[in-house]
Amino acid sequence: MRMVFRWYGEGNDRIPLSHVKQIPGVEGIVWALHDVEAGEEWPMEKILKVKEQADRYRLHIEVVESVNVHEDIKLGLPTRDRYIENYKRTIEKLAQVGVKVICYNFMPVFDWTRTDLYKPLEDGSTALFYEKEKAETMSPEDLVDKIAGNSDFTMPGWEAARLKHLSDLFQAYKNVSEEDLWNHLQYFLEEIIPVAEENDIKMAIHPDDPPWSIFGLPRIITNKENIRRLLNLVDSPSNTVTLCSGSLGANPNNNIAEMVNEFADRIPFAHIRNVKIYENGDFIETSHRTADGSVDIYRIVKAYHDNGFTGYARPDHGRHIFDEECRPGYGLYDRALGIMYLWGIWDALERAKQEEEK
Ligand code: DNO
Ligand code: MN
């Protein structure tokens, strides 16, 4: 397991790399050019700037999250080919600086969705929260206002410029069924996977978060069967998954450890975090500890260990603790604690194996 840490870039993340460097076992950053719009080719000067910054702390930049997919590609519009060309050029450039994994998602309009960014937990910390009834009755505009308008930070997946055209976007998706979305994903993958293969890059799709349809928009990367289908769309070692335990784990029917066992050789990147699910369908993000949430983090880490996992892993979101002022879900402290919990499980498993072999 190779531990990495998401970092939003100089001037865009309050956490300095000097602090990231001090978290035990972190070897690289998970990064992106957050100021480049979806569909545009990433400029080499900007890529090199991030590399220089990371080099200074001897942190690598092998994992990118995300190169976002332009909406026209998801909609299957004729203009998609231009954006797919840009995507290919970006893959090639990233390979040149040593990138190995590119995470992306294929969710229409919205990335991760929550109804509350700072919901108090019983211990006095706050965390990202999803209230089912609110999500089902709220308008998309109110949600955008709540998430993008409520934060001092630019929120990836919630870019104001793109979401200005919300009603047009919803109109455009009116006639796009789940099957259409599958077809559009297949078209995209058939184009980009050969380029990824040639450049020794793994394209790792992130599951939908939460793993069900919101506002009537189609969502397809939601469970084991659908991940199997995705991997079969283009059967290549470069067509892979970012297995996110928290996203998939919001649905209690998803057994993540089972997915690790089935898809191990096609998971180059693991997102590990916990959520607590309530009976009414609400869920809140908790500490990484198994006892604190509904997802069995121990079993998941054990499944990775059993399968000899050598891919990258990151703590996904964390709570906001110790009065830290941070990007929602992306503070330093709780993610650092999460890393130590993951290492604790991993090292104990590793040690037990070595003792057995003696
Ligand atoms: C949620 C997060 C996501 C992720 C993007 C990747 O679990 O990991 O917001 O960053 O969906 O494209
Ligand atoms: Mn995730």
Image (cartoon, rainbow, N blue to C red):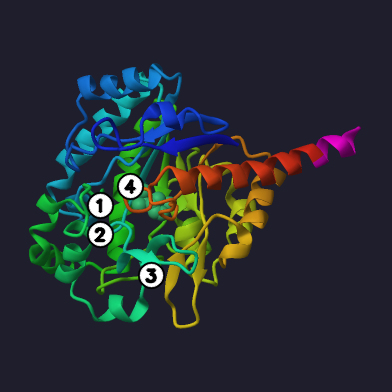
Q: Quadrant of the N terminus?
A: top right
Query: Label 1, label 4: how many angstroms apart (C-alpha)?
Result: 17 Å
Nearer the observer: mark 4 or 3; the answer is 4
Q: Secondary structure at mark 1?
A: loop
Residue wearing tag 2: 110
CB at disc 3 and ligand 1 closer than 8 Å: no
Nearer the observer: mark 1 or 4; the answer is 4
Q: Amino acid at mark 2?
A: Phe
Q: Are marks 1 and 4 in contact (CB under 8 Å)?
A: no
Q: Is residue 44 left or right of residue 113?
A: left
Query: Label 1, label 2: how many angstroms apart (C-alpha)?
Result: 6 Å
Nearer the observer: mark 2 or 4; the answer is 4
For residue 113, above or below residue 34: below
Query: Label 2, label 4: how many angstroms apart (C-alpha)?
Result: 22 Å
* Of callouts 3 and 2, the N-terminal one: 2
Task: Between residue 149 and residue 314, name the one nearer to us.
Answer: 149
Residue wearing tag 4: 326
Q: Is residue 206 visible?
A: no
Q: Are marks 3 and 2 in contact (CB under 8 Å)?
A: no
Residue 157, which numbered label?
1
Q: Residue at x 45, y 18 (%)?
A: 58
Q: The magenta stretch spans which residues? A: 352-358
Q: Secondary structure at mark 4?
A: loop
For residue 129, above or below residue 133: above
Q: Residue at x 88, y 39 (%)?
A: 356
10 Å crowding of disc 3: few (<14), some (14-19), many (20+): some
Give how far across and how far down residue 314 sits, in percent: 49, 42
